[in-house]
C-alpha cells in the first residue's frame, strides 16, 4: 500500500486527536502511584478519552481487552490491564494509548517511574525518550525511512541497550496501523523517502539487556526474553517541509 499523504483538513483532525492523547498521558502521569492497579489506570484513561468524545482505539482491536496498554518492568508492550497487577515503588510502567477523533487516529506511549526507582531504570527511561528525539532529527522530507531505525539503534547501543526487533512503528491516519513499517534498528534497505503530509507513529521500544522478546500465554503481553527492563516512547508525528510536528505532545 502506498503511504498516504494527509490533506490540510485531515492534519487538523489528527492534531486534535494528538492533543487529546497528550492530555490523557499528562493526566495518567500523575495517576501512576504505588498501590494502584493497572485496571484503575485503564479505567481512568478510558474515562478521559470518552470525555473528549473520542474512541479508545486499542479496545477490542484484534480482541485486545483494554484501552490503555499497561506494561510493567520486563513487559515491553501490550500488557493487559488487570486488578491484580498493583504498582509498587521501584517499578517502571509503560503506558501506550490510542484515540480516534472524528475518524482519525493518534497513538502515543510513555514510560513512567513508580515512586522511587533505581538510577539504572531512570537512565533507561531517559535514553529511550532521547532516542525518539534523536530520530526526529531525520524525520524530514527527503530523508529515507531507514535513517530512523539507524539513529535509534546507534543512540541506544551507546548505553549497552538493545532495540526490540519483533515490533515496529507505523504510519497512522484513518487506521491505527498504516504503511510504512518503521523499524527501530539498522536496515540495509533504504525504504521510502519521507514526504510532507505523512503521519507516522515513531516508537522506540528499548531493552536494558538483549533484544529478544517473547509473547506470554495471554497472546498479548510481550516480555523481554532475558527478564531485563524495557521502556517505550512513542509519538504521532507529521512530516512537513521543514521541522517535523509532534502531534501527540503538549510541551
Ligand atoms: N502502539 C501500539 C501499536 O502501535 C498499540 C497497539 S495495542 C493494541 O501497535 F491493543 F491495539 F493492539
Ligand atoms: Co504505535
Image: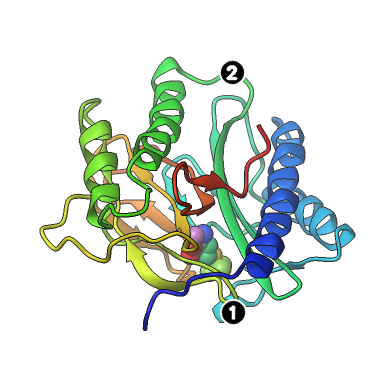
- Which of 189/245 is in front? 245
In the rendered image, the vertical position of residue 228 relative to residue 53, given as above or below:
above
Q: Kindly report the distance in space between the C-alpha atoms of the residues bearing marks 1 and 2.
A: 34 Å
Whole-percent x, y for residue 234 in the image: 50, 48
Compare marks 1 and 2 and give the one earlier in the sequence: 1
In the rendered image, the vertical position of residue 53 relative to residue 121, given as above or below:
below
* Residue at 83%, 53% in the rendered image: 48
Residue corresponding to mark 1: 63
* Residue at 10%, 58% in the rendered image: 188
Extreme right residue here? Answer: 51
**The disc label shown at residue 193, or none:** none
Q: Using residue 17 as the reference point, say whether residue 1 is left or right of it.
A: left
In the rendered image, the vertical position of residue 100 relative to residue 143, given as above or below:
below
Whole-percent x, y for residue 87 in the image: 64, 37
- Whether residue 57 is visible, yes or no, is no
Mark 1 Cα shell of 10 Å, populated few (<14), some (14-19), many (≥20): few
* Residue at 48%, 57% in the rendered image: 201
Residue corresponding to mark 2: 116
Q: Using residue 83 as the reference point, say whether residue 175 is left or right of it.
A: left
- Which of 169/78 is in front? 169
Mark 2 Cα shell of 10 Å, populated few (<14), some (14-19), many (≥20): few
Q: Quadrant of the C terminus?
A: top right
Amino acid at each position: 500500500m502506498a503511504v498516504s499523504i494527509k490533506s490540510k483538513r485531515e492534519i487538523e483532525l489528527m492534531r486534535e486527536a494528538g492533543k487529546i492523547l497528550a492530555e490523557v498521558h499528562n493526566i495518567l502521569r500523575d495517576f501512576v502511584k504505588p498501590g494502584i492497579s493497572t485496571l484503575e489506570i485503564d479505567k481512568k484513561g478510558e474515562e478521559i478519552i470518552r470525555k473528549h468524545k473520542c474512541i479508545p482505539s486499542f479496545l477490542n482491536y484484534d480482541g485486545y481487552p483494554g484501552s490503555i496498554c499497561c506494561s510493567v518492568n520486563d513487559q515491553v508492550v501490550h500488557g493487559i490491564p488487570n486488578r491484580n497487577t498493583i504498582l509498587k515503588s521501584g517499578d517502571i510502567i509503560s503506558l501506550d494509548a490510542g484515540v480516534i477523533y472524528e475518524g482519525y487516529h493518534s497513538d502515543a506511549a510513555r514510560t513512567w517511574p513508580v515512586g522511587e526507582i533505581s538510577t539504572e531504570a531512570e537512565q533507561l527511561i531517559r535514553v529511550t525518550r532521547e532516542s525518539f528525539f534523536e530520530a526526529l532529527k531525520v524525520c524530514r522530507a527527503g530523508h529515507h525511512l531507514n535513517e530512523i531505525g539507524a539513529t535509534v539503534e546507534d543512540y541506544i547501543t551507546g548505553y549497552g541497550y538493545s532495540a526490540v526487533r519483533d515490533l515496529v512503528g507505523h504510519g497512522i491516519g484513518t487506521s491505527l496501523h498504516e504503511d510504512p513499517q518503521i523499524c527501530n534498528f539498522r536496515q540495509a534497505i533504504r525504504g521510502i523517502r519521507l514526504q510532507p503530509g505523512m503521519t507516522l507513529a515513531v516508537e522506540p521500544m528499548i531493552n536494558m539487556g538483549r533484544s529478544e522478546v517473547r509473547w506470554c500465554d495471554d497472546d498479548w503481553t510481550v516480555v523481554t526474553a532475558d527478564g531485563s527492563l524495557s521502556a517505550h516512547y512513542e509519538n504521532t508525528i507529521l512530516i512537513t517541509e521543514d521541522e517535523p510536528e509532534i502531534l501527540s505532545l503538549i510541551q
